[in-house]
């Protein structure tokens, strides 16, 4: 049985690719009122804190009746996100966000271009952040990718010290067995996590 697509969620999904909608549907006049409405405000700007629009808001702004709006949104969605899609998304820009924390110290910065993407476990020296963190020996703990508008955002989390494949295995094992929580794995430093993991009787 095919799962029914949420119309409200389609609106939110379109907001995350709103900069691509005009190009994707430039020849579809019937879609333009919806695209213009979604492009009118920057819903993804955390500083503006604009709530996502309701269906009623779109109906009033576009003059489209509820059943027509639903039909158009479903059609637009199917042309991008189904097996029979006709259009492909494009993410031409890349941003690299670096996040580092060390006890009470923290730092984050963004890079527009990197010749090589670091891999998990790679050691990195960053003398450029000495004012924020008084140590300069890091390794890549985690890499995540986010796709938003026309940009691929690569989030690189660094930790102080050297990468240990054994500790990574033990940490993943503890997460799998519920011995530590997902939130703990990010909020606690390595020393605190080791006390929990290696403090278990079966690891002694």
Image (tube, helix red, strand yellow):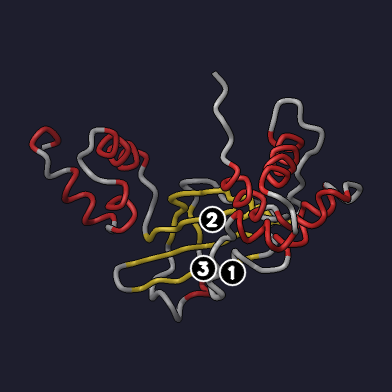
Query: In the rendered structure, which disc, 1 or 2, sits on the residue that comes first in sequence?
Result: 1
As displayed, is residue 144 above or below residue 2? below
Residue underneath mark 2: 155
Of the pair 101 and 25, the residue shown nearer to us: 25
Residue underneath mark 1: 45
Residue at x-position 62% and y-position 48%: 13
Residue density around tag 3, few if under 14, some if 14–19, many if 20 or more, within 10 Å: few
In which quarter of the view is residue 60 placed?
Answer: bottom right
Q: In this image, 199 relative to 124: left or right?
A: left
Q: In this image, 59 relative to 45: left or right?
A: right
Q: In this image, 182 relative to 27: left or right?
A: left
> In x, y percent, where is residue 194?
21, 49
Helix, strand or loop for disc 3: loop
Residue underneath mark 3: 126
Residue density around tag 1, few if under 14, some if 14–19, many if 20 or more, within 10 Å: few
Helix, strand or loop for disc 1: loop
Q: Residue furthest toward the left? A: 201
Q: Are marks 2 and 3 in contact (CB under 8 Å)?
A: no
Of the pair 78 and 154, the residue shown nearer to us: 78
As displayed, is residue 194 above or below residue 189? above
Residue at x-position 57% and y-position 22%: 2
Helix, strand or loop for disc 2: strand
Point out the frontmost of discs 2 and 3: 2
Query: In the rendered structure, which disc, 3 or 1, sits on the residue that comes first in sequence?
Result: 1
Marks 3 and 1, how far apart at CA: 29 Å
Residue at x-position 46% and y-position 56%: 157
Point out the frontmost of discs 1 and 2: 1
Marks 1 and 2, how far apart at CA: 18 Å
> In x, y percent, where is residue 191?
23, 56
> In x, y percent, where is residue 195?
16, 51
């Amino acid at each position: 049985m095919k799962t029914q697509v949420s119309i409200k969620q389609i609106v939110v999904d379109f907001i995350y690719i709103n900069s691509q909608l005009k190009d994707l549907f430039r020849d579809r006049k019937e879609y333009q009122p919806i695209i213009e409405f979604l492009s009118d405000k920057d819903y993804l700007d955390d500083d503006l804190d604009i709530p996502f629009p309701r269906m009623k808001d779109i109906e009033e702004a576009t003059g489209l009746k509820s059943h027509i709006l639903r039909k158009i949104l479903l059609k637009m969605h199917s042309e991008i996100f189904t097996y029979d899609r006709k259009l492909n998304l494009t993410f031409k820009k890349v941003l690299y966000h670096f996040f580092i924390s060390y006890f009470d110290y923290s730092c984050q910065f963004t890079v527009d271009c990197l010749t090589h993407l670091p891999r998990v476990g790679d050691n990195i020296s960053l003398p450029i952040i000495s004012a924020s963190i008084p140590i300069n020996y890091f390794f890549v703990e985690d890499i995540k990718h986010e796709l938003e508008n026309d940009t691929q955002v690569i989030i690189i989390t660094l930790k102080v010290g050297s990468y240990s494949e054994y500790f990574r295995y033990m940490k993943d094992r503890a997460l799998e067995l519920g011995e530590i929580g997902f939130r703990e794995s990010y909020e606690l430093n390595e020393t605190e996590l080791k006390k929990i993991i290696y403090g278990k009787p079966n690891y002694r």
